[in-house]
Image: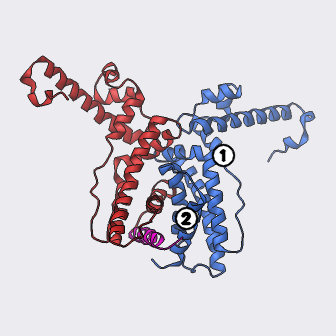
Chain colours: A red, B blue
Amino acid sequence: MPTHHQTGPSAGTGSNIDARTQRSRTTVLAAATDLLESTGVGGFSVDEVARRSGVAKTTIYRHWPTREALVLDACAGLDDRYDLPDTGTLHGDLRRFVADLVCMVEQAGWAAVLPSIVDAAERNAAFADMHAQIQKGHASLVSQIAERAIGRGELPAETDTALLASTVLGPVFYRRWFSREPFDAAFIDAVTTRAIRGAQGSD
Amino acid sequence: MPTHHQTGPSAGTGSNIDARTQRSRTTVLAAATDLLESTGVGGFSVDEVARRSGVAKTTIYRHWPTREALVLDACAGLDDRYDLPDTGTLHGDLRRFVADLVCMVEQAGWAAVLPSIVDAAERNAAFADMHAQIQKGHASLVSQIAERAIGRGELPAETDTALLASTVLGPVFYRRWFSREPFDAAFIDAVTTRAIRGAQGSD
């Protein structure tokens, strides 16, 4: 890996160019992420990124050969860091996770963009791959909570964690993107309790 | 309401024009629905509808003043007729409904288009209204099953049918559009059983 970034602007012309290139990449990506949040994948255009960032289209195309490559990079920038709750009980962990998830689907930048990624994934393999990554990230949070609960004897060892994920994430995503009903604490409680009851009972 | 359509082509020039107008409307709408199924809302263009239908753009714009008006009409044409199961038990009705829903989200024309409608609804009031109508249709099927079960004493009278809809539709929609895992009978059984158990227990 090159280490130019650590040597500072005084290290010579090569570094200056690298630093400038890096700055314009950062500027373009920030503008691209902003645009994506307001238009989704469908309305995204390199022309508009050039206008918003003040970076010439020819420069943008030098870094990202296609509109799609830039959209995919901008999507990757929407990701949130999330620290999984660890309260010591399945109910505590899952209640907190559902509440955090509700907050994210209501407020996070990716939440307004996700339907356009889902749509693009219906028709385009690169978006399908990216969507699968986002999706695995969400489902693995539920799996980690379930694994801990299995370790504590709160869930049976044979728990179907993919099914559990669909009973936790499904109702929240449904309410956010399909029924568009408001979220409240009663809904968060009910999703938590029903998902646990479902996983503990035998089908 | 005009009754020209019943008088046949011999009824005069006015009728001929009406019949021709009606035919070109039907041709355009069929082409628009086909296009919508392959591109979603985002990739839909009046140019392409004109090309596929062989009807001039100027004629299309006479019927639908904007691209959006044509997309909205084409969306309305995707709707399925559905006869609600009536097996005499909550489990029977819901199991059958979930199985039918899985079949529809895997095969129906609207299933490939719905994510693009959800995306358009994030930014456009006309699509948000149309999406709300589609959504109410889906949720009301679950409500009707629940009402019958309440009548038979299988569910408490105070059952939250909107919550029940989110625990039935949520996991199915999640698996179709988010996790993209395959459906099987075990999933259909588990969604049915868990939704009923959730609605029967107290949260």
Local SS, label 1: loop
Of residues A33 and A138, which is closer to you in this image? Answer: A138
Q: Which residue is mark 1?
A: B78
Q: Residue at x 90, y 38 (%)?
A: B8
The image position of residue B197, as x and y in percent, is 53, 74
Q: Residues within 10 Å of mark 2 (few under 14, many from 20)?
A: many
Vertical placement of A167 versus A136: above or below?
below
The amino acid marked with disc number 1 is Leu
Q: Nearer the viewer, mark 2 or mark 1?
A: 2
Residue B191 is tagged as 2
State the image quarter where residue A196 is shown. Answer: bottom left
Q: How many marks?
A: 2
The amino acid marked with disc number 2 is Val
Q: Is residue A192 magenta?
A: yes
- The lab-note entry on whether marks 2 and 1 share a chain reads yes
The image position of residue B51, as x and y in percent, is 66, 25
Vertical placement of A80 versus A153: above or below?
above
Local SS, label 2: helix
Disc with the residue nearer the chain's start (2 vs 1):
1
Drawn side of residue A149 relative to residue A13, left or right: right
Residue A3 is tagged as none
Quarter of the rendering occupied by the C terminus of chain A: bottom right
Give the spatial CA distance, label 2 vs label 1: 26 Å
Q: Residue at x 44, y 65 (%)?
A: A159
First to last magenta residue range: A185-203
The image position of residue A147, as x and y in percent, is 35, 63
